[in-house]
Amino acid sequence: MKKKKRNHKKYKFTYIMTTVFTLFFCTLFLKGYTPFEETGDNLFHVQVNGQAVGTLGDPEEAEELLIQARRDVVSSSQELVFMEAELEVEGEEVLWGRVDEKETVLANMEDVLRGCIQETMHHSYTMKVNEYIVNLASAEEVKQLLQAAVDKYDREGKFRVELVYDNSREFSVLTADVTDADPTAEEGESAVVEGGIQSFFDQIGTREMPQEEKDFDDYDQGILEMDFAEKVEIVESYLPLSQLTLLDEAIEQVTKDQEVPGEYEVVAGDTLSEIAIKVGIPMEEIVEMNDSLESISSTLQIGQKLVIVEPEPEISVTRTEERYYEESYDAEVIYIDNDDWFTTHTEVHQMPSAGFRKVIVDVSYVNDKEVSREILKEEIVMEAVAKIVERGTKIPPDYIKPISGGRKTSGFGLRKAPTKGASTNHKGQDWAIPVGTPVYASCGGTVAKAGWGSGYGYVVYINHIDGRQTRYAHLSKILVKAGQTVKQGERIALSGNTGVTTGPHLHFEMLINGKQVDPLKYLK
């Protein structure tokens, strides 16, 4: 009986010790484990962008930690950072389960997010001028770029570029102002404003005081003002580094001249050589640009438009310069119109003589191209004498080719004599044609001669109302007579092979003031 009682006490002691040990073990070793409760999922496995970052006991903790992780990743950058941040939480119901420390899960999340950054968007500035757009890293770089465009023409450093908000725009848009580099230059001394009766008399005195004429030394020579020819627009933006342009590269773009198609309108007195000097393009290149020009000797017409290529930078700068110079000058030609004369007839009544003057002038430029000038002060040292020309106003008749078809052979000017007795200085234009080809009057007029003309063979001369004369030679048959009036295009003869000739052809001449000229230059 005693033995049985002892065993009972022994079992009871063992139970108590086992229970105490179990509780001690749970307290000491099972910290962080979630006790089993039949309430659904109580252990949550967390993934970010498909990568495991830890295990938590509450799914809301995962969302809070992800927000904190994203904040920590971008806090080290001043730019916009784009990254993938897809959170997945998978729960399960367990009896025993180990959860990770929040700090561990947070650190794992940050590591995953840093590896998933797609692109960093840098705070930058986009500048637009017409069709030219450039992205730069800062507003200071935009200023340096625009300053480089100004400094290309402002070699004295008198002007600076400032960025200001454009009040005419609804959104925050910057534009550029070109101002005097010395802000005190325009301020001068501050004026003292007086009131009362003294102010009244001062104003009267100011109005009545005549303004003295400025002397040459009183003018400020040099650049007076500068600005950009086009509207400059600058906006803040966030862009990837790959879309930003380096400052040196952007400066080269805006200061280097680009070839831009342009147009030049021919004015009275223009020659191709003078136009080439004006636009700075060789004559041969102008001919290549224009289908209307066959060669550098092609005839130009007033009002004719020529295609030219003008050098222009991406950003154009306007400026006004005040300049002093001394020069020889010519007075404007004085014309006397004569309605009885054709426009081909002129007479000079007085020859010109150059004068000499001193000048202060405001010259306006777009880039390096002068667009206007205004004379502010002029002192004539020696008066110029004007050229006086009397000129006709009547439009002269036009001239047409005297045959249909034909092959050009000898042209106007020096040549090797084709046969004995022929001239080496050819005074007309030859076309090879079969005998009997109709010959027409190049222009209406009066037949001056119709008959034999020695080396010309059978020939017809026609006098025209503008004073010119045309000649048609080596004919086989004459269809008009001297004194007869003919119209333009009227048949006057048949071509032939008479006179000094090497074969059937028509020899055609035009005379102005009794002197042969190249007739091809005057045919319509």
Image (cartoon, helix red, strand yellow):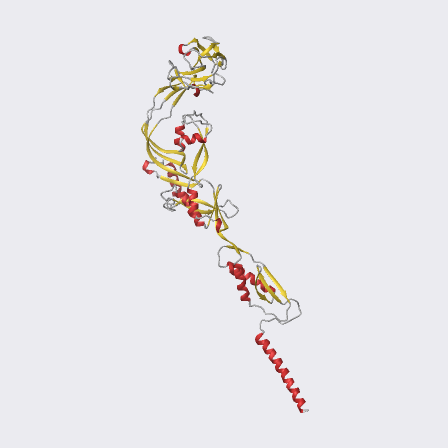
194, 452: nearer the viewer: 452
**What is the x, y in percent for residue 139?**
45, 49
Relative side of 381 to 426, left or right: left
Residue 508 in the image: x percent, y percent?
A: 44, 16
The residue positioned 53% from the left and 64% from the top of the image is 107
Residue 226: x, y in percent? 41, 41
Judge whether residue 208 can be spotted in this image.
yes
Q: Which residue is depicted at the point 54% across and 62% down?
A: 109
Q: Nearer the viewer, residue 471 or 232?
A: 471
Q: Quadrant of residue 343?
A: top left
Asked if 384 appears above or below 185 in the picture, the reply is: above
Residue sitting at the far bottom? 2
Residue 118 to residue 511: above or below: below
Name the quarter where the N terminus is drawn: bottom right
Q: Is residue 392 visible?
A: no
Residue located at (46% from left, 35% from top): 261
Q: Foreground: 241 or 228?
A: 241
